[in-house]
Amino acid sequence: MKKTSTVFFVAAFICLTCGILMPCKVSEVLSPEQLVAQATSIVVAIPIEYQKKPKPPDEQFGSIKFDIKKVLKGEPSLKQVTVQGELTDKDDFNEGTVPYTSVRPSGKQGSCFAYYYKNGASYLLFLKEQNGSDEHKTKELSPYWTPLAPVNEQLKSMDDPWLQWVESAINKK
């Protein structure tokens, strides 16, 4: 009887977590050139604090306030942006070669997007206007508009090759 119960619980656990562990699948990931062309704004930003902390178990992510250090494309007066995610103390650099064609490692764990941000690190954010969550139909900027794409990559420095490539691509236009 004990062996049957154990097998049942293991099988139930596998079934319940199967959807969580399945990798994200999309028909097409935008090219780096398409990301540059289609983003409303492209900025270098640093996460500074939670605007709203997550409340487990209902909310996995909170709202993180970012200070914008450099606007590469979009409204030059943009000073801050709020993005859904979780602050962490771990780096999550893209393992690919520049120009990046896919999301950093934490975005390849089934969610389609990287939601983790190292507190105080710099990120290159490809932002696009999305419908806001309120009844007034406001627009908000979000990096979560094209799955599995490198839309919110952590930078190693302001001389990061990914940042240099994006600046060059913007200047070609």
Image (tube, rainbow, N blue to C red):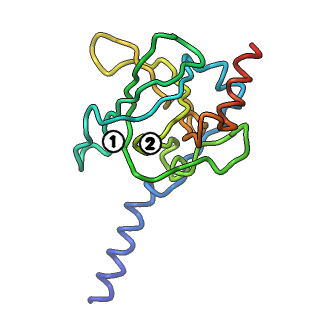
The quadrant holding residue 132 is: top left
- Nearest to the observer: residue 149 or residue 157: 157
Image vertical order of residue 121 relative to residue 105, above or below: above
Return the x and y of residue 101 as percentages of the image width and height.
69, 39
Return the x and y of residue 124 as percentages of the image width and height.
56, 32
Residue visible at 68% across and 27% down in the picture: 166
Return the x and y of residue 168 as percentages of the image width and height.
74, 23
Q: Residues within 10 Å of mark 1 (few under 14, many from 20)?
A: some
Q: Residues within 10 Å of mark 2 (few under 14, many from 20)?
A: some
What quarter of the picture does the N terminus occupy?
bottom left
Determine contact: label 1, label 2, CB under 8 Å.
yes
Asked if residue 120 lies left or right of residue 113, the reply is left
Amino acid type, residue under disc 1 in the picture? Phe
Amino acid type, residue under disc 2 in the picture? Tyr
Image vertical order of residue 30 relative to residue 88, above or below: above
The quadrant holding residue 61 is: top left
Q: Which residue is mark 1?
A: 61
What quarter of the picture does the C terminus occupy?
top right
Image vertical order of residue 15 relative to residue 60, above or below: below
Label placed on residue 115: 2
* Helix, strand or loop for disc 1: loop
Asked if residue 96 lies left or right of residue 93, the reply is right
- Nearest to the observer: residue 90 or residue 58: 90
Label placed on residue 27: none
